[in-house]
Structures are given as structure tokens and as C-alpha cells.
Amino acid sequence: MADIDTSLKNNFLIAMPSLNDPFFHQSVVYLCEHSDQGAMGLIINRPSNLTLSELLDHIEIPHQHTTASKTPILLGGPVAKNQGMVLHDSPDDLETSVAISDNIFLSGSTDMLKSIADQAGPKNILVTLGYASWSAGQLEQEIAHNDWLNVTADDNILFHSSGQTAWQQAAALLGIDIRLISDNVGHA
């Protein structure tokens, strides 16, 4: 396989309307890694029935977080569905985080959740269970097959949009009203 000339790290993958996979239908994936070895990302617009407060209670982290009962935990992807991931915007927590871009970081540490529970964590967070991954060349094939659009990620959409609104807003970054694209592909 040829080397990837341009990494899609720190990009949104926007599911085309024809992508009928139940996990990825109308999804927006934030790509945390992309190389000739494969790709890894988090679905940012698929809320679970679990809140941050319930997750903290489940893993026995005491908390006083006032918005935790309203903060949804997202279904980040079909891989390792019990693995928690936190996307955040604070470079102060680099001991437990990896930089994705200049202002977006990823942590899988319970220390990050403890910091959030103590209200000492980052201002903007997105907590997921699970992640999405692609083997070498798989994502490129899916993009060539017209399953995904891609665009540089927008922090406002990443941290402040959800559900179908995030899907539509991410596509709008490309000047596209995704609701107007047919879900029938390959038929004349």
C-alpha cells in the first residue's frame, strides 16, 4: 500500500446518507489518528442512555459536578465498548493525555475522570465509551466508495453539538446540506 500523503487526523468523517451501517448511520467521527497503519476515531454524535454522573457512580468516583447528570456519555464506536475516552481542550492535563492537535487532547485515564469529578478538569469535554478503528487502507477504501466525507474538525461542533444537528453542521463546513443528498447510490 502506498504511503498516505495527508493524514486525516483532527478531521471529521461525516457519514454519507447511503451509509446504512447501524453504528455509523448519520454519524460524525472525530479522527484521533490516521496513518498508513490505519485509523482510530470517536463517534461524537451518538449519545448513550448513560450520563457522566452515572458513569462516575459506576466506577466509584465521588463527584460534585453540577452538570454531570445532564452530560451524556457517547457511544464512541463498536470497538472496546467498555473503554472510556475523554476528548478535551486543556493542555494542562498532558500527563494523562495525548495531543491530537494544538488544542484537542485525548485521555483514557481515570485520573482525567477524577479531575472532571473534582471540577478541576478541562472546560470542554466529550466522554465516550468505545471507539472506531480501521485497518491499513480500509478508511481510504471507504472514502473512495463514497461512504464518508471529511473536513477539518471544528471545536464548536466537537464540544457543543449533538445528534443529527452535529451531522448537518459538520457537512455544512463543506457547504453541503447533507439532508438534500440522496441515500440511493449507484442507480441512474
Image (cartoon, grey):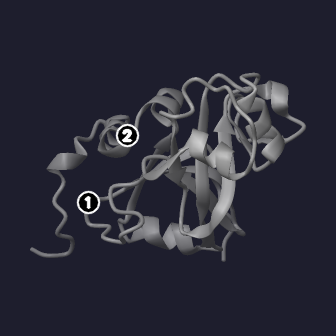
Q: Is residue 175 left or right of residue 46?
A: left
Q: Position of residue 8 (x, y in %)?
A: 59, 51
Label 1, secondary structure: give it.
loop
Q: Quadrant of the N terminus?
A: bottom right
According to the picture, the residue beneath numbered tag 1 turns out to be 17
The amino acid on which the numbered mark 1 sits, given as a three-letter code, is Pro
Q: Position of residue 70 (x, y in %)?
A: 47, 33
Q: Position of residue 119 (x, y in %)?
A: 71, 23
Label whose residue precedes the other's in the sequence (1 or 2): 1
Residue ID at (40%, 63%): 24
Q: Mark yes or no: residue 87 visible.
A: yes
Q: Dot 2 surroundings within 10 Å: few (below 14), some, or many (20 or more)?
A: many
- Relative to residue 167, is residue 139 depicted above or below? below
Residue ID at (34%, 62%): 25
Q: Is residue 127 left or right of residue 19?
A: right
| Residue lying farthest to the left in this orientation | 188
Q: Within the image, what quadrant is residue 97 found in? A: top right
- Relative to residue 135, is residue 103 depicted above or below? above
According to the picture, the residue beneath numbered tag 2 turns out to be 166
